[in-house]
């Protein structure tokens, strides 16, 4: 009788362990990179979303979602992660223009009124994903304008507010620049001219924690009041995670919620999301494989193995580190989606370039990615 009771207890214990939330299990681990953060979750503003991907015999996809400390109403600065929806919307706008018989594509040469050289939408999108180039984002921002961006995201039920450019003096200017598209740069007659767009001013965000820290540096002086983020870009983790699901698995969303781009453009942007810096022509010593791949490889300069494909977009600024990634391990038959954000600003002063990115933030995200990957490999077996 005792042995039957013991066997039943062990069975219940095994079932209980197997049903434990994987994020909770990881955050309770004694791995230094995780433990350093998990002992003070609120301080580091950690949010995590993890989607297991389930495929039936027909290949149809469903998700098992786990989340930790995720809140749309608590503000974190999304930094360069906002480049992800901007790249998608640029392709969607091109698609609309083409349907209106305007003969331009993502390969067409274009220039903004403040640029000195031509580029193309596809080149700017590759820069956005390969090295997170700020000016590439700004050029697409001018093409779209704030009103168009926010109206389109809202129509797809994506909770967000994109209000400004990045790392430029005219970041919050409500008027977008004019653009010219040409078949050949030397042509005197353009294919398409877009005038500057006057956009509405952005309202202050009505969210928790938009006032942050003890102070910030402005013109080399310390301003000893909290930094106000209420006019900054807003892209909560659920929205970012949903963007990844929309582009990788569009059939899991209603037609209204999807991005209206061609299958060719969808293939292009998925490939761009995986592109490593050297594959886009950047110096491998400066832009190593994990340069903008924080999960799993952010804390190493070693090459990413060929069987691990990471389709992602990161953000890092003001002490915030964010990554949203779809992983595909072809060797171990593993795939999953992981999104997370962490804030590392020990002295609570902004704009002083004194953030614990390499000491705390990136090691945490890298280890989180490795542990989720290990968990998925075990599940696959």
Image (tube, rainbow, N blue to C red):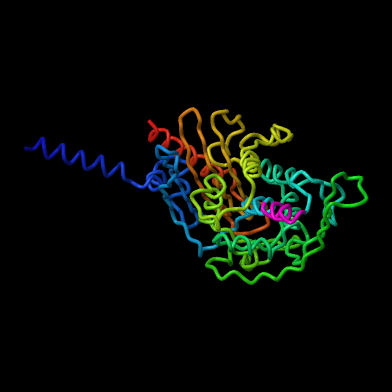
Q: Quadrant of the C terminus?
A: top left
Q: Position of residue 68 (x, y in %)?
A: 43, 53
Looking at the image, residue 159 lies above or below residue 245: below
Q: Position of residue 302 (x, y in %)?
A: 60, 30
Q: Which residues are magenta?
A: 92-101
> Can residue 354 be seen at all in this image of the molecule?
no
Left or right of 111 in this view: 233: left
| Quadrant for the N terminus in the image | top left
The residue lying toward the viewer, choosing from 326 and 290, is 326
Residue placed most toward the observer, 20 or 201: 201
Examine the rendering and report whether any part of residue 179 can be seen. yes
Residue nearest the observer in this picture, 145 or 375? 145
Q: Quadrant of residue 58?
A: top left
Q: Is residue 78 left or right of residue 338?
A: right
Q: Is residue 325 above or below residue 154?
A: above
Which residue is drawn at the image coordinates 82% and 49% (left, top)? 110
**Residue extending furthest left?**
1
Q: Quadrant of residue 211?
A: bottom right
| Residue 205 placement (x, y as % from top left) | 59, 69
Q: Main secondary structure of the magenta part?
A: helix
**Total numbered circles:** 0
Q: Quick check: 350 left or right of 250?
A: right
Q: What's the residue at 78%, 49% (across, down)?
A: 104
Q: Is residue 123 magenta?
A: no
Residue 120, x across and y down, in percent: 78, 46
Rendered position, 158 above or below 289: below
User: Who's the residue at 45% across and 46% down the image?
Assistant: 51
């Amino acid at each position: 009788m005792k042995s039957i009771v013991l066997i039943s207890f062990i069975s219940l214990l095994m079932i209980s362990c197997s049903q434990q939330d994987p994020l909770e299990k990881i955050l309770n681990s004694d791995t230094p990179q995780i433990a350093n953060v998990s002992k003070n979750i609120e301080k580091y503003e950690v949010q995590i979303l993890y989607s297991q991907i389930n495929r039936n015999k027909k290949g149809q996809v469903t998700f098992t979602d786990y989340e930790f400390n995720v809140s749309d109403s608590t503000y974190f600065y999304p930094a360069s992660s906002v480049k992800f929806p901007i790249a998608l919307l640029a392709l969607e706008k091109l698609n609309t223009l083409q349907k209106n018989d305007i003969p331009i594509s993502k390969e067409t040469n274009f220039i903004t009124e403040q640029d000195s050289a031509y580029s193309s939408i596809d080149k700017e999108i590759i820069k956005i994903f390969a090295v997170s180039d700020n000016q590439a984002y700004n050029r697409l921002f001018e093409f779209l304008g704030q009103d168009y961006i926010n109206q389109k995201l809202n129509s797809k039920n994506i909770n967000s507010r994109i209000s400004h450019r990045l790392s430029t003096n005219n970041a919050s200017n409500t008027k977008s620049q004019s653009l010219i598209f040409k078949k050949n740069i030397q042509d005197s007659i353009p294919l398409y001219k877009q005038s500057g767009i006057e956009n509405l001013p952005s309202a202050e965000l009505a969210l928790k924690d938009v006032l942050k820290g003890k102070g910030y540096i402005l013109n080399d002086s310390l301003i000893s009041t909290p930094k106000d983020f209420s006019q900054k870009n807003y892209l909560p983790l659920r929205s970012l995670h949903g963007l990844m699901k929309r582009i990788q698995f569009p059939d899991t969303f209603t037609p209204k919620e999807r991005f209206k781009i061609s299958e060719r453009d969808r293939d292009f942007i998925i490939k761009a999301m995986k592109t490593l810096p050297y594959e886009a022509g950047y110096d491998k010593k400066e832009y190593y494989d994990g340069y903008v791949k924080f999960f799993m490889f952010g804390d190493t300069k070693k090459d990413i193995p060929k069987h691990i494909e990471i389709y992602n977009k990161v953000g890092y600024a003001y002490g915030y580190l964010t990554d949203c990634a779809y992983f595909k391990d072809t060797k171990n038959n593993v795939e999953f989606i992981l999104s997370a954000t962490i804030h590392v600003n020990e002295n609570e002063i902004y704009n002083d370039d004194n953030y614990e990115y390499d000491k705390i933030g990136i090691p945490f995200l890298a280890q989180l990615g490795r542990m989720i990957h290990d968990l998925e490999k075990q599940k696959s077996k």
